[in-house]
């Protein structure tokens, strides 16, 4: 039967071998990967080492991988080099295959922006004085002093404002 298969070009043949290697892999390596994943009801969390941004990192087949990218590789048949593996769930440590999708760099950037993880936002710091002022000004649902309005005023993401209000950032030391 296999003789009836059309011959693959050398490049396609290389790709196929690479894919087989990753998918079948040495099964032990693949199993070891999934053994280091903690499945919750929603996300499957990589329990190995992580980058500062929270992405799982793993050494597999002689190279470093982002854990979620490897998870995609292991479950699907490879990932085109030009595409990123992105999260639907906004959880960098998650390796659950159905929480992942393929996208380009541009989509990645748009996705980050949409989820409020823009580059600049990470570096914005508010001072305790700002926080005190935010708490004084804040009026829930107000067009002028609600979360989005104060976010614009202080140049931060509105989540930062809510963190201040909820006390997860600059909690009052009263
Ligand atoms: Zn997830």
Image (cartoon, helix red, strand yellow):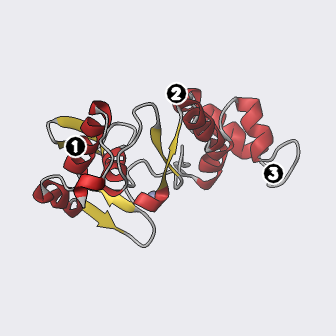
Residue bearing mark 2: 123
Alpha-carbon span between mark 1 and mark 3: 61 Å
The picture places residue 167, in percent across and down from the top left corner, at 57, 52
Q: Nearer the viewer, residue 163 or 25?
A: 25
N-term-proximal mark, 1 vs 3: 1
The picture places residue 105, in percent across and down from the top left corner, at 53, 31
Residue under the image location 55 percent in, 28 percent down: 119
Residue bearing mark 1: 17
Q: Is residue 174 left or right of residue 4?
A: right
Mark nearest the camera among 3 and 2 is 2
Mark 3 crowd level (few <14, some 14–19, many ≥20, 10 Å Cα) = some
Q: Nearer the viewer, residue 148 or 113?
A: 113
Alpha-carbon span between mark 3 and mark 2: 26 Å
Q: Is mark 2 within 8 Å of ligand 1?
A: no
Disc 1 element: helix
> On the image, which quarter does residue 35 sit in?
bottom left
Disc 2 element: helix
Residue 139 marker: 3
Q: Are marks 1 and 3 in contact (CB under 8 Å)?
A: no
Mark nearest the camera among 2 and 1 is 1
The picture places residue 46, in percent across and down from the top left corner, at 30, 55
Q: Can see residue 126?
A: no
Q: Which part of the image, by quadrant, shows the N terminus?
A: bottom left
Residue reaching furthest to the bottom:
41
Q: Can see residue 98?
A: yes
The picture places residue 162, in percent across and down from the top left corner, at 65, 50
Q: Are marks 3 and 2 in contact (CB under 8 Å)?
A: no
Mark 1 crowd level (few <14, some 14–19, many ≥20, 10 Å Cα) = few
When the figure is inspected, residue 146 is found, relative to residue 47, above or below; the finding is: above
Alpha-carbon span between mark 2 and mark 1: 43 Å
Residue under the image location 52 percent in, 32 percent down: 122
């Amino acid at each position: 039967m296999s003789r009836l298969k059309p011959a693959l070009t050398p490049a396609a043949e290389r790709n196929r071998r690479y894919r087989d290697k990753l998918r079948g892999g040495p099964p032990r390596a693949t199993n070891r990967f999934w053994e280091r994943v903690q499945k919750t009801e929603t996300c499957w969390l990589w329990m190995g080492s992580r980058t500062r941004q929270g992405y799982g990192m793993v050494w597999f087949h002689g190279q470093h991988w982002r854990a979620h990218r490897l998870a995609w590789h292991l479950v699907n048949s490879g990932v085109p080099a030009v595409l990123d593996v992105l999260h639907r769930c906004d959880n960098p440590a998650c390796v659950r295959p159905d929480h992942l999708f393929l996208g380009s760099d541009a989509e990645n950037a748009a996705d980050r922006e949409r989820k409020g993880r823009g580059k600049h936002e990470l570096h914005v710091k508010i001072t305790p004085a700002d926080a005190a002022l935010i708490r004084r000004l804040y009026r829930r649902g107000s067009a002028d002093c609600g979360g989005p309005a104060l976010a614009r005023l202080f140049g931060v993401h509105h989540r930062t404002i809510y963190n201040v209000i909820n006390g997860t950032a600059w909690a009052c030391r009263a």
